[in-house]
Image (cartoon, rainbow, N blue to C red):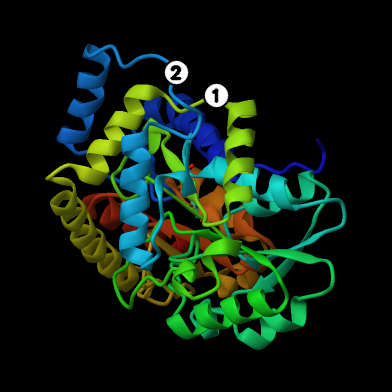
Amino acid sequence: MPHLGTENAFSVIGKAKKFEQEVLKPQGKYLVYLQIGEPGFNTPANINEAAIKAIRDNQTHYTATPGIPQLRDAIAKSTGGYTGVDYKPEDVVVVAGGKPIMFYTINALIDEGDEVIVPNPSYPIYGSVTEYLGGKVVPIQLKEENDFNFSAKELEDKITAKTKLIIINTPQNPTGAVFPRELIENIARLAIKNDLWVLSDEIYNEMVHEGEHVSIASVKGMPERTVILNGCSKTFAMTGYRVGWGVTKNPEMAKYLEQLACNDISCVNTPAQYAALEALTGPQSAIEVKKMLNEYKERRDLMVSMVNEIPGMHCHKPKGAFYLMVNVRQILDRLKITAADLCERIMKEANVLILPGTVFGLFGDDFVRFSYVSTKEMIVEGLTRIKNFLATI
Ligand SMILES: Cc1ncc(COP(=O)(O)O)c(C=O)c1O
């Protein structure tokens, strides 16, 4: 257990809610939440109605472990649509949110001492699970000056005889980077040359503001050595439904994912599977997703321009997802504190919640992460509070 990490964003929110309730509320004050990693919209109504209808129709029993056939078929088609790969329902395993696919894929592949290459900063669970299973995390630094991308050479230098798996996530949490086609093709070339697996976390594939999302599975020779992780959480504002999936053209891996899911959860909540089916095949989804995306883009532009007006803070304009990595090195050096200390002070003294970059790994230590899912009013309120607070210290 000491090797297992966690997602600190969840513990931060627990602490913050307690602080708001016990300290701020009695004074008539409130926290502005600019750390949230989930869509700032309600789940579209047609999707909720599908879940309610499933309950009314008594779709409340176990399903086959890898999911109801209609949903697996819809996922195969939607994944095929953006990768160009002829995925079939048997290539799909439906699980409880995207996250379990990390646990299952790493579990299926990693033995004691195997190496997993993981960009850093990144979603913390990749490293946590790898170390828990006795693997070794080999980080590649995502540098701000490279728009949080990395080069083929940097990747090649990290590959050893023990490397088994590369984990990529584009659009990326927490940097908002969208990896260009050339980088994806280079990762694929090195994976094939060195006989490596790729876990491709595509949970933000619809959240692209500039450039294009390129799935590594679209490169010839990759579908058989790639597990795509995706799901309903971010695209359709369905985080609480807990529906995600793994997709792979490797039948042995698909079998392992199913077997792990069977040992773990038996199957995903049945009404939630019907809601996911509606999300993927229902008439309104595409319109709703586009509306949400347009709004995120406006919020991003507002947040980027306000952040860059705060002395000591700067950030680039992220191309995708809904996060902003803000460089605060100057402020940290001036105050001789860490990013975690700064976030704590901003919560307690400016009453705004943001996350330290170190939540996402060692190379996040110059940064704090904002998310731009909150309303424009809250973005303006939060950043005004931070600006005023920083001017006083
Ligand atoms: C990069 C990334 N992958 C996966 C997930 C988990 O998604 P889910 O809630 O569907 O498990 C998240 C959630 O924040 C994420 O940021």
The answer to whether residue 295 of the structure is visible from this angle is yes
Disc 2 marks which residue?
62
Residue sticking out furthest to the right: 113
Of mark 1 and mark 2, the one earlier in the sequence is 2
Of 298 and 192, which appears nearest the observer?
192
Of 12 and 280, which appears nearest the observer?
280
- Distance of mark 1 from mark 2, alpha carbons? 8 Å
The residue under the point 12% across, 45% down is: 283
Work out whether 75 lies above or below 68: below
Residue 248: horizontal and vertical position, in percent? 52, 54
Q: Are marks 1 and 2 in contact (CB under 8 Å)?
A: yes
In terms of secondary structure, where does tag 1 sit? Answer: loop
The amino acid type, in three-letter code, at marker 1 is Ser
Dot 1 surroundings within 10 Å: few (below 14), some, or many (20 or more)?
some
Of 256 and 345, which appears nearest the observer?
256
Residue 336: horizontal and vertical position, in percent? 68, 66
Compared across the picture, whether 83 is left or right of 199 comes to left
- Residue 266 numbered tag: 1
Compared across the picture, whether 211 is left or right of 192 comes to left
Work out whether 122 lies above or below 3: below
Work out whether 176 lies above or below 255: below
The residue under the point 30% across, 43% down is: 237
The amino acid type, in three-letter code, at marker 2 is Tyr
Residue 145: horizontal and vertical position, in percent? 53, 85
The picture quadrant where one finds residue 233 is top left
Residue 113: horizontal and vertical position, in percent? 87, 57
Q: Quadrant of the N terminus?
A: top right
Compared across the picture, whether 301 is left or right of 91 comes to left
Work out whether 25 lies above or below 386: above
Compared across the picture, whether 203 is left or right of 274 comes to right
In terms of secondary structure, where does tag 2 sit? Answer: loop
